[in-house]
Amino acid sequence: MRHIPAHPEQIESPVLSIVRNALRAAALASSDRAALDVAGEALRRIAELVVVEVRHA
C-alpha cells in the first residue's frame, strides 16, 4: 500500500525511501550479516542515484 502524503512538503526523496526501506529490512533481517547486506545494497543504490544526478547536472 502506497503512502500518500497529506501535505506536499511530505513528499520524500528517493534517498529517504531507500534508507527507510533498508532500515526496516535490516531490523527484520535474520542475522547480522544479512542486515549488513541490506545496508550495503542500500548504499549501492544511493551511489547509483548520485552518479545519475551528477551526469544529468
Image (cartoon, grey):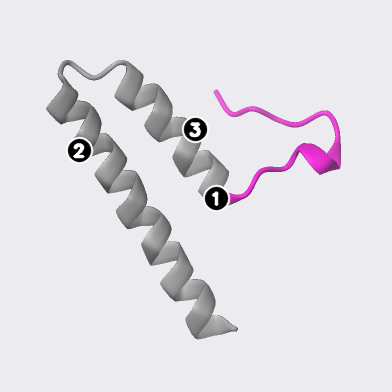
- Cα–Cα gap, marks 2 and 1: 19 Å
The residue identified by callout 1 is 14
Q: Residue at x 38, y 65 (%)?
A: 48
**Mark 1 / mark 3, whichever is N-terminal:** 1
**Residue located at (24% from left, 28% from top):** 35
Q: Is residue 54 above or below residue 42?
A: below
10 Å crowding of disc 2: few (<14), some (14-19), many (20+): some
User: Does residue 10 appear to the left or right of 19 in the view shown?
Assistant: right
Q: What residue did someone put label 2 on?
A: 37
Mark 1 → mark 3, Cα distance in angstroms: 10 Å
Please report the residue visible at 33 percent of the width from the left and 25 percent of the height from the top.
25
Quarter-of-image position of residue 56: bottom right
Q: Which region of the structure is painted magenta?
A: 1-13
- Is 43 one of the magenta-colored residues? no
Kindly indicate whether the residue at mark 1 contacts the one at mark 2 (C-beta within 8 angstroms): no
Nearer-the-camera pick, 4 or 33: 33
Q: State whether residue 34 is above or below residue 51.
A: above
Residue at the (52%, 49%) spot, across then down: 15
The amino acid marked with disc number 2 is Asp
Expressed as whole percent of the image width and height from the top left, the position of residue 36 reads: 22, 34
Reading the image, the residue beneath label 3 is 20
Q: Secondary structure at mark 2?
A: helix
Q: Residues within 10 Å of mark 1 (few under 14, many from 20)?
A: few
Looking at the rendered image, the quarter that the C terminus falls into is: bottom right
Among the two numbered marks 2 and 3 on one chain, the one whose residue lies closer to the N terminus? 3
Sequence-wise first label, 2 or 1: 1
Question: Which SS class for mark 3?
Answer: helix
Q: Quadrant of residue 30?
A: top left
Query: Could you tell me the amino acid type at mark 3?
Result: Arg
Residue 22: image location, x then y, percent:
38, 34
